[in-house]
Each structure stands twice: as structure tokens, then as C-alpha cells.
Image: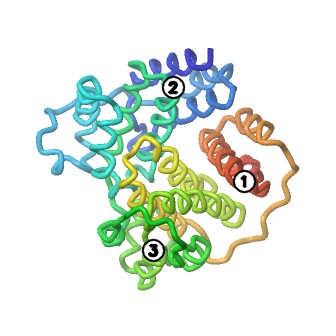
């Protein structure tokens, strides 16, 4: 039943565009996938009834994508990108399309304040349960199209991604120290304005690129997966320290690497190390442009089971609260760290 409800929700949402009110991201597909995933399918259509009214219509295309490099990051071509990926996914297996486009899109992980990769992560998880059908393929196509249309690099991250090589060595690597790397991130001076203005300040921060390079590349796919798992874990704990400063935007420091981690099983293992590098650049950027220099003591939140944590988020109803709960439940399942469960409740208090 939850699968049928999710597919019905996708059908309703696929008549709408990936953004609304200028450039706000359409969170509908991500939120309904999380609600259905965690057994709250009875809320999906009621949630959509309230949400759909704010969305724009599906954008019209201008002309077919021929020079894909030239069209990357052009939001005026959103309709063309949606049509392009719809056609690609009708003609080729979805894993082949994803495998071709993931390395092309990954350097632009900042797209739509990281919502491009987040939406792809939710779509891949829906397909990865062997529920391949037209609705879910359409969702992956719209997610990839949105990412392509809003493709935006993290300043300074190109050198980080270009330097990634990966083998199969699985020995210790002293360079993978997520805690130290996160602690060493600088902050922009003027934490006002939208995400694009804030990201634009990063090239002028002298310590930014050295801090970005502090997390050394993974030497093996297994190491990349461990690094991503740790990154999501530590970013979730950092939300408790910094979330008060930007309750909505700092959610993405957690949900972006979560989306990348969820996508790994569908990718060639050779793409895992650059995936860690890109996810790190996204979390680092969102932290540097939205988090204060000094965090606060983590709040005291009433203890709850994972199921209760998500149920509270579902009742709250805000898409960011739902998606953060979804992400920290993954991190909790991997780590057993009960502190993570407080992050979703804290977001519910702040948002």
C-alpha cells in the first residue's frame, strides 16, 4: 500500500516544476518518499493537498539539449533538461543513465542549495527497492534534470575533485579525519543574504581552500563509504550546536551527504571516492556560510525511539523537519549514537 501511495503522490507532483516562487525548491517528492518509507503513508495525500497549492507548473522547454556542457547550470533550460532525462530513462536502464551523469553532475553539487543531489538521493532509494515503474523513473529524471539546470560548483572544490584517485587499498588513512576537518572550517564574515550570495564570498576567505583540502581523498571505495557515514554522523551532531543560527539551511549540511551515501550502491565503486569529496565540499560550504563560529551546548530533548522521532516529525509536517528526521535515523542506525535522535526534535522546535 505504501508503494502505491508513493506512486500516486509522484503522479500528482510530476505536473509541477522543480522550483516555485522564483527559485525555492519543490520539496514535495523528497518529503513524500520519506513519509512513505517510514510507514506514514496515510499522511502523504493530506500533506500534498496542503503543499501543492504553492507550486508552479511544469516548465516548458525551449529546444532540445544538444550541447550538454553549455546547458549545465542554465535554469532557463529546466524544461529542456526534464525532457532530456525523461527521454534518456525511456531508452536506457536507469542505473546506466545515473552512472553516466553522476560524475558530470557531481562537481555542481551546490545546485539549488544542494537540493538537486538530495532529490536524486530520494529517487534512487525509491528505485533501489526494486520498485521500478514509470512514476519512479519519471521522478529520477526530474531530479536529475533539476540538478543539471541548477548545476553550481562549490567554490574551490574543483581542485579537490580533480585530485581524487581510488584503488582498492583498505588500510588506515590518517587523512580521513572528519571531526578535525569540520572543526577547522572558517566562516564567511557577512552571514546575510541568500545561499548564492553567501557561497560567492568563499573565494575571498583565505582559510577556505586549505580547510576544504583538510579532508584527504579516500584511498578505496570502502574508505569512501566510511568517510561518508562519519560525515553524516558528525554533521547531524553539529546541527545540535549550530542549528539555531539557520534552522532550515543547516539541515542541508546533513541531508546532502546522506543523499550521496544512499546513492553509492547504485554507482560503480570507482565513483565512491569522488562522491565523498563532493559531499564533503557541500557540507563544508553550508557550514561555513551558515553556522556561527562558536556553537552552543546541545539542547536537552526528551528521549524517544527512532519510530517516535519520525512520528513527531511527520506530525510537525515541515518538509525540512521530515527530511532531517529521515537522515538522522539512517545515521543512528549506522552508529547507534542516540544523540543524533535529538537533532530532528530540535529542528522541530526551531522551524
The residue located at (62%, 47%) in the rendering is: 327
- N-terminal label among 1 and 2: 2
The answer to whether residue 30 is above or below residue 335 is above
Per the rendering, the mark at residue 343 is 1
Closer to the camera, 193 or 28?
Answer: 28
The residue located at (70%, 47%) in the rendering is: 333
The residue located at (29%, 44%) in the rendering is: 101
The answer to whether residue 117 is above or below residue 13 is below
- N-terminal label among 3 and 1: 3
Mark 3 or mark 1: which is in front? 3
User: Looking at the image, can residue 194 be seen?
Assistant: no
The answer to whether residue 270 is above or below residue 27 is below
Per the rendering, the mark at residue 216 is 3
Report which quarter residue 48 is drawn in. Answer: top right
- N-terminal label among 2 and 3: 2
Mark 2 or mark 3: which is in front? 3
**Residue of label 2:** 52
Amino acid at each position: 500500500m505504501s508503494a502505491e501511495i508513493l506512486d500516486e503522490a509522484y503522479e500528482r507532483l510530476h505536473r509541477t516544476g522543480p522550483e516555485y516562487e522564483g527559485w525555492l525548491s519543490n520539496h514535495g517528492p523528497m518529503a513524500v518518499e520519506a513519509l512513505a518509507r517510514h510507514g506514514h503513508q496515510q499522511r502523504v495525500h493530506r500533506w500534498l493537498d496542503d503543499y501543492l497549492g504553492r507550486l508552479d507548473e511544469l516548465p516548458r522547454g525551449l529546444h532540445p539539449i544538444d550541447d550538454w556542457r553549455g546547458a549545465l547550470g542554465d535554469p532557463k533550460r529546466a524544461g529542456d533538461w526534464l525532457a532530456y532525462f525523461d527521454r534518456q530513462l525511456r531508452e536506457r536502464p536507469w542505473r546506466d543513465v545515473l552512472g553516466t551523469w553522476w560524475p558530470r553532475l557531481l562537481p555542481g553539487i551546490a545546485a539549488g542549495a544542494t537540493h538537486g543531489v538530495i532529490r536524486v538521493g530520494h529517487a534512487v532509494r525509491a528505485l533501489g527497492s526494486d520498485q521500478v515503474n514509470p512514476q519512479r523513473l519519471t521522478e529520477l529524471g526530474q531530479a536529475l534534470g533539476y540538478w543539471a539546470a541548477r548545476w553550481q560548483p562549490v567554490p574551490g572544490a574543483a581542485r579537490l575533485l580533480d585530485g581524487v584517485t581510488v584503488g582498492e587499498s583498505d588500510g588506515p588513512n590518517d587523512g580521513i579525519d572528519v571531526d578535525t576537518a569540520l572543526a577547522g572550517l572558517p566562516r564567511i564574515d557577512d552571514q546575510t543574504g541568500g545561499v548564492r550570495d553567501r557561497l560567492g564570498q568563499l573565494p575571498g576567505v583565505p582559510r577556505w581552500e586549505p580547510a576544504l583540502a583538510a579532508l584527504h581523498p579516500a584511498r578505496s571505495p570502502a574508505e569512501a563509504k566510511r568517510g561518508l557515514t562519519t560525515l553524516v554522523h558528525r554533521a547531524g551532531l553539529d546541527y545540535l550546536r549550530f542549528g539555531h543560527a539557520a534552522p532550515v539551511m543547516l539541515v542541508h549540511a546533513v541531508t546532502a551527504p546522506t543523499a550521496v551515501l544512499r546513492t553509492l550502491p547504485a554507482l560503480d565503486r570507482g565513483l565512491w571516492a569522488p562522491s565523498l569529496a563532493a559531499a564533503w565540499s557541500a557540507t563544508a560550504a553550508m557550514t561555513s556560510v551558515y553556522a556561527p563560529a562558536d556553537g552552543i551546548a546541545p539542547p536537552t530533548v526528551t528521549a524517544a525511539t527512532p519510530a517516535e522521532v519520525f512520528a513527531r516529525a511527520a506530525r510537525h509536517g515541515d518538509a525540512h523537519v521530515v527530511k532531517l528526521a529521515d537522515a538522522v535515523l539512517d545515521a543512528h542506525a549506522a552508529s547507534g549514537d542516540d544523540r543524533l535522535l535529538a537533532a530532528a526534535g530540535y529542528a522541530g522546535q526551531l522551524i
